[in-house]
Amino acid sequence: MDYTNLQNNVTGKKSKVGIIGAIGGYGYTLLAQIPKVKLMDLRVICDRHPEECAAVLKEIGYDESKIAVCKDRKEIERANADEILIVSDYRLVIECGITALVECTGNTAVSLDAALLALRKGINVYMVSKEADCIFGTVLNQVAAENNAIYALVNGDQPRNLLDLYSWAMLLGLEVVAAGKSSEYDFVWDRENGDLIYLDGESKTENMPEMLQHWYYEGRETLAGRRKLLEKYTSVISADLCEMNLVSNITGLVPHSPFLSYPIAKISELADIFIPEEDGGILKKTGVVDVFYNLRGRDEASFCGGEFIIVKCENKKMWDILKSKGHVMSRNEKYACIYYPYHFMGLETPASILLGDFMEIGTHTECRQVSVLTGVADYDLAKGTVLNVSGHHHSIEGLTPQLLERKASGNAAPFYLLNGTTLLKDVKRGETITLDAVDLSELETYKLYAKGLELE
């Protein structure tokens, strides 16, 4: 999309932004970028620790004299229009004269309540908390439309970036057989000394000269060899499945398999891997979402947790021309991979906010619960076990996430509604946590999820 006309807007209008969950990694990157965006002002940030908010704003370079901590609505009303307000109660954010609410907490109950409060007042909502959208996105899109507001996922996180790429393909009439992203961390192999580094934040290193046997892609057997070598570093990551859940619900693409495929692959191989089995790939069906681990050499660029689509090459002459430009195509020349090797977190998010606030782009009333994120017991779980979401990947100890087509999900309980629940019965290893294993019936969050399931 060409943003020039938006950039040159001379109406004097500005987005007035409020951020909930403001000082985490995502919130920080957005706070750091907003001062660079001429059509946008930061109005209010919310966090349980106001003093930390103030410190972060000062660190970034916001004018200390323009920062005001407000404890209630009266203090907000007394504040100057050009001040940046800090509040600890998320419900106060919508009282601060904002046009755009950015929700970053990852707390499903807070995300839902804040989004509903804002949308019902006609305030646009930009959802970073994927944990909330995978459960309530269907309803929130409807509420936005009913109140002439915008509800949108944000650029900077993989789901919106992938949706942008997918919708571009749909506009051009391309047939997408698979869409997905790379998982968060790369495998980097040094051919000179045989060292394999897994970039998981701690950068685990292991000497692995045998990787040479599986370095060049020869087919599915290459993937099997890589998996055998690197199995101990791999896992099913709840954040990955959650993000693909969001894409599935808007596009109608379905999970390739409950735990997704996670092949260990180079960028140049994707058009040979995410294609039907009869063409040498791994797909048992098409029209799917999936995830891979990026494998690269020490001197090769990362995929950076970016996004890809695999499309059919229907006009051989046209794709021969494109192949000569260096585009990634399958060996049989029937498929091509088109990709964005990035997601820049909050640095990109202002684009989504401005598209919503100025051009009313974002709401997807067609969003439906196409896929359901659920949990499978890793080991026998006793009655009385309390399930809690925790950690960097917002996982639940004792559960492996799975992403199911809704029609195959039965009475599975939504993964992120399990937070804080207690098992009402024993659950055996390998069993899905179902609605009769926990009590969600009285939760307002579950009632809204059930309402979303009713949409046709």
Image: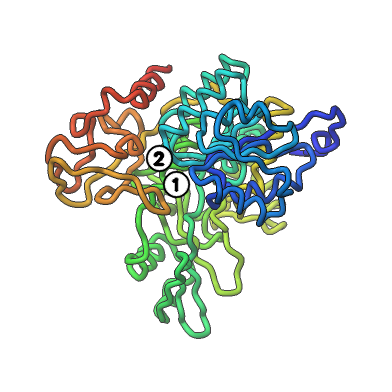
Percent x, y of residue 115: 52, 28
Q: Is residue 308 visible?
A: no
Percent x, y of residue 435: 23, 30
Percent x, y of residue 348: 66, 46
Instruction: Look at the picture and state if 291 lies above or below 297.
Output: above
Q: Name the quadrant containing residue 358.
A: top right
Mark 2 or mark 1, which has the lower sequence index? 2
Callout 1: SS: strand
Q: Name the quadrant containing residue 118.
A: top right
Query: In the image, which disc is placed on residue 13?
Result: none
Nearest the camera: 272 or 356? 356
Instruction: Look at the picture and state if 252 lies above or below 64.
Output: above
Real-space Cα distance between discs 2 and 1?
7 Å
Identify which residue is drawn at 46% across, 80% down. Answer: 195
| Number of residue marks | 2
Identify which residue is drawn at 55% across, 51% down. Answer: 52
Callout 2: SS: strand
Nearest the camera: 403 or 282? 403
Q: Amino acid at mark 2?
A: Pro
Q: Is residue 53 visible?
A: yes
- CB within 8 Å, label 2 to label 1: yes
Q: Which residue is mark 2?
A: 255
Query: Would residue 397 appear left or right of 101 to someone viewing this image?
Result: left
Q: Which residue is mark 1?
A: 290
